Image (cartoon, rainbow, N blue to C red):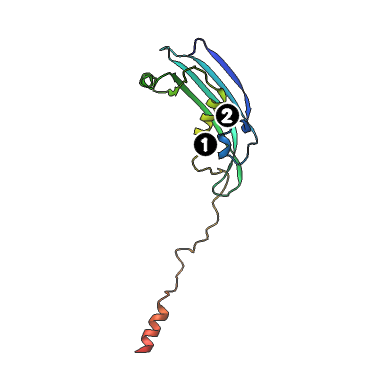
Amino acid sequence: MVSAKRYFEGTLPLAAFTRLRDSLVDAEGECRFSLEFGRDAMNQAFVEVRAEADLPMQCQRTLERYLQPVKVVQQLGLISSEAQEAALPEEMEPLLVPEGGELRAIDLVEDELILALPVVPINPDSSLPESVWPLEDEVKPNPFTVLSALKDHKK
């Protein structure tokens, strides 16, 4: 799989990430990334994925567009069968490599960006809407008072 240490870095437009685009408001912007392939002290092949991007998302509090900063650093242990997963160090996530051993860099970066997306995107700079509910201290009239008055009148 990995015979020597290799390092790649670059930028990709967000429009290049076809699966990620469905979670974004638009595809404006770019992602800076680096991939480092190597072997650890136990001779385990790995790839370290680093990615940084400001992802355009829709705030679920205000429904406005905002930029979600995402910074990912993930070390993936390259395995050729699921049986090898148990031998990976605790800090490594498994990555099952296809038979040919070829990986697409864009897929590695896109997978990590998708995993870094918030479940419910909320702009940290937004504020809660003003309260529209009546205050608890307000005394509310009893809707059955009128019925009680009719009942007393009928007697």
Residue at 56 percent of width and 23 percent of height:
105
Instruction: In the rendered view, tell whether residue 60 sits above or below residue 53.
Output: below
- Of the pair 115 and 97, the residue shown nearer to us: 97
Residue at 45 percent of width and 65 percent of height:
137
Q: Amino acid at mark 2?
A: Glu
Helix, strand or loop for disc 2 = strand
- Of the pair 101 and 84, the residue shown nearer to us: 101
In percent of width and height, residue 122 lies at: 54, 44
Quarter of the figure that contains the C terminus: bottom left
Helix, strand or loop for disc 1 = loop
In percent of width and height, residue 18 lies at: 58, 33
**Number of residues whose C-alpha sits closer than 10 Å to that of mark 1, classed few (under 14), some (14–19) or many (20 or more):** some
From the image, state whether disc 1 or disc 2 is nearer to you: 1
Residue 37 - label: none
**Number of residues whose C-alpha sits closer than 10 Å to that of mark 2, classed few (under 14), some (14–19) or many (20 or more):** some
State which tag comes first along the sequence, 1 or 2.
2
Residue tagged 1: 117
Residue at 58 percent of width and 49 percent of height:
63
Residue tagged 2: 52
Inter-mark Cα distance, 1 to 2: 12 Å
Instruction: In the rendered view, tell whether residue 136 sits above or below residue 5.
Output: below
In percent of width and height, residue 36 lies at: 53, 18
Query: Going by the picture, which residue comes out furthest to the left?
Result: 155
CB under 8 Å between callouts 1 and 2?
Answer: no
Q: Is residue 135 left or right of residue 16?
A: left
In percent of width and height, residue 5 lies at: 52, 12
Q: Quadrant of residue 153?
A: bottom left
Q: Quadrant of residue 42?
A: top left
Query: Going by the picture, which residue comes out furthest to the top?
Result: 3
Q: Amino acid at mark 1?
A: Leu
